[in-house]
Image (cartoon, coloured by chain):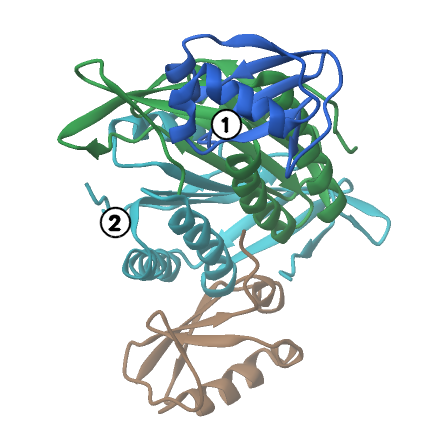
Chain colours: A cyan, B brown, C green, D blue
C-alpha cells in the first residue's frame, strides 16, 4: 500500500480547504492507516515597520525544488514507517489567511506521522529553494526571512 | 567554455536579469569574481550557489554549459 | 483573538472530510495564525485472531469526558502560545477508513501547534473516559485496547 | 445513604445494567465489596472509580447521592 509516486508539489495560488478535504477523503480506502498528521502553513498578517502584510508572492527554482521535495520524501519513507506522504506548496500570490503549505503524513500508528510531519516541515523550510516576498497594502514589498 | 547563470529572489532585484552567461571561467571562485564585476550590488548579499541543482561548498570546478544558480536564503513555507 | 469557548466535543458517527474543510476555512479570518497542526485518527482494519475489524463503536461517560476535554484545552492554552484549539471525537459507529478523532491546533509559530497537538492527542487517549468496541465482519466484537 | 453506580465499557457486559444503587456504605472500599458481592464477574477486571466525575485513588469517603462510575481502561481516539 506504500504510495511514493513522484508528483508535482507546486500549486499556483492558495491551497484550498476543498483540496485538503478531497485529499483526506481519498485516504479512506487505505485501511492500514490509523493516524494522519496534517501541517498547514497560513499567511499571517505580520506588522513590519508599521505596514501590514496583505499577501506573500512565492517563487522557486522549480527543477531543484522538485528534486529536493523528492529527496525529503525518500528520506522520510526510509526513516519512518509511513503509509502515505503528500507535500504541496504554493507558487505566486497567496493572500493573508490562505494556506501556502500542506504536508499530509499518514501512518499505521500515530508516532510515525507526528515525528515525520514535523521533520518534513523543517526540511522544506531549510532545504527547498523557495522564496516568499511579503506584499503590503501600499504594494511595497520585502523579502521574507525564515526563522 | 560557457556558464549559464540563473538568479532568484532578492538577487534578481539587483541584477534585473533572471539569467545571463559568463565565459572563460574554470571554477566557481573565478565565476563569482566575474559576476561581482558585472553586478557589484550582489556583493552586499549572502547567497549560496547550486551547480546543476546541487549546492556547492568551497571552490568547485565548472564545465561547459553548466547551470549555476545564485540562491539567497530560502523562505518557503 | 483567543478562542476558548466551551463546546461539545462529541459528534455522532464519523467526522467527515467536509466538516474538517469547513473548520479549516473558518480560520482564514484569524490573520495572526501562521501554522495549523491537525491530527486525525482513522479506524484501521486490524486483523485480530483471524478476523478483520469493520468498525469501532464508541461510548463515553459524557459528562466526565466533556470536563476532561475542557481541562485538556485549558492546560494546552496555559502551556503553549495558541490561537485556536478544537477537539472532536466520535460517538457510536465509525467504519473502517472513517475519521473518529479530529484535533485542530492553530498558533502564530509552528512549534506551538506541533508540540501542543501531540500532547493533546496523548492526553485524550490517556485521560478521557471513552471506550471503543471493535466490531468484526461476523458482528462479533472485542473491546479495544489503547497502546 | 444511597450511592448511584454507573457502569461503562466491558464492565457493562458483566453487569448487564448501566446503573444501580447501593445503600449503607461509607466509603469506596465498602462500596467495592458490596459491588463484588452483587456482580462477582467484575472481580476479574481492572477498573478505576470516579466519584462525581473525579478519579479517586485509595479509599475515599462517600456522601449520600454521590455518583460513582466504574471505568475500565480508556480506549478513545
| Nearer the observer, A57 or A111 | A111
Q: Position of residue C72 (x, y in %)?
A: 66, 36
Indicate the chain on which mark 1 is placed: A
The reply, left or right, for residue A115 in relation to residue A140 is left
Contact, CB < 8 Å: mark 2 with mark 1?
no
Q: Position of residue A19 (x, y in %)?
A: 42, 28
Of the 4 image quadrants, the one containing the N terminus of chain B is bottom left
Which quadrant holds residue D22?
top right
- The disc placed on residue A6 is 2
Q: Residues within 10 Å of mark 2 (few under 14, many from 20)?
A: few
The reply to whether residue A139 is visible in this rendering is no
| Nearer the observer, A54 or D73 | D73
Helix, strand or loop at disc 2?
A: loop
Residue drawn at point x = 71 percent, y = 22 percent:
D26
| Nearer the observer, C142 or C17 | C142
Helix, strand or loop at disc 1?
A: helix
- The disc placed on residue A52 is none
Depicted C61 relative to depicted B30: above or below: above
Q: Residues within 10 Å of mark 1 (few under 14, many from 20)?
A: many
Residue drawn at point x = 68 percent, y = 40 percent:
C33
Residue drawn at point x = 55 percent, y = 8 percent:
D20
- The disc placed on residue A17 is 1
Indicate the chain on which mark 2 is placed: A
Depicted C124 relative to depicted C139: above or below: below
Amino acid at each position: 500500500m506504500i504510495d511514493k509516486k513522484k508528483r508535482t508539489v507546486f500549486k499556483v495560488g492558495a491551497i484550498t480547504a476543498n483540496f485538503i478535504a478531497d485529499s483526506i477523503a481519498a485516504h479512506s480506502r487505505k485501511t492500514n492507516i490509523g493516524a494522519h498528521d496534517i501541517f498547514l502553513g497560513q499567511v499571517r498578517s505580520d506588522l513590519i515597520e508599521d505596514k501590514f502584510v496583505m499577501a506573500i508572492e512565492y517563487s522557486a527554482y522549480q527543477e531543484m525544488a522538485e528534486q529536493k521535495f523528492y529527496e525529503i520524501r525518500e528520506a522520510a519513507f526510509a526513516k519512518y514507517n509511513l503509509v502515505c506522504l503528500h507535500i504541496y506548496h504554493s507558487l505566486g500570490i497567496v493572500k493573508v489567511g490562505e494556506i501556502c503549505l500542506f504536508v499530509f503524513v499518514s501512518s499505521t500508528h500515530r508516532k510515525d506521522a507526528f515525528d515525520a510531519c514535523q521533520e518534513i516541515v523543517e526540511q522544506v523550510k531549510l532545504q527547498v529553494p523557495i522564496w516568499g516576498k511579503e506584499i503590503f497594502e501600499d504594494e511595497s514589498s520585502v523579502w521574507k526571512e525564515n526563522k | 567554455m560557457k556558464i549559464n547563470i540563473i538568479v532568484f529572489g532578492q538577487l534578481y532585484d539587483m541584477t534585473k536579469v533572471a539569467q545571463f552567461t559568463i565565459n572563460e571561467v574554470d571554477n566557481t571562485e573565478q565565476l563569482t569574481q566575474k559576476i561581482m564585476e558585472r553586478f557589484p550590488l550582489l556583493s552586499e548579499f549572502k547567497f549560496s550557489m547550486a551547480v546543476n541543482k546541487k549546492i556547492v561548498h568551497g571552490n568547485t570546478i565548472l564545465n561547459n554549459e553548466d547551470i549555476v544558480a545564485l540562491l539567497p536564503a530560502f523562505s518557503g513555507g
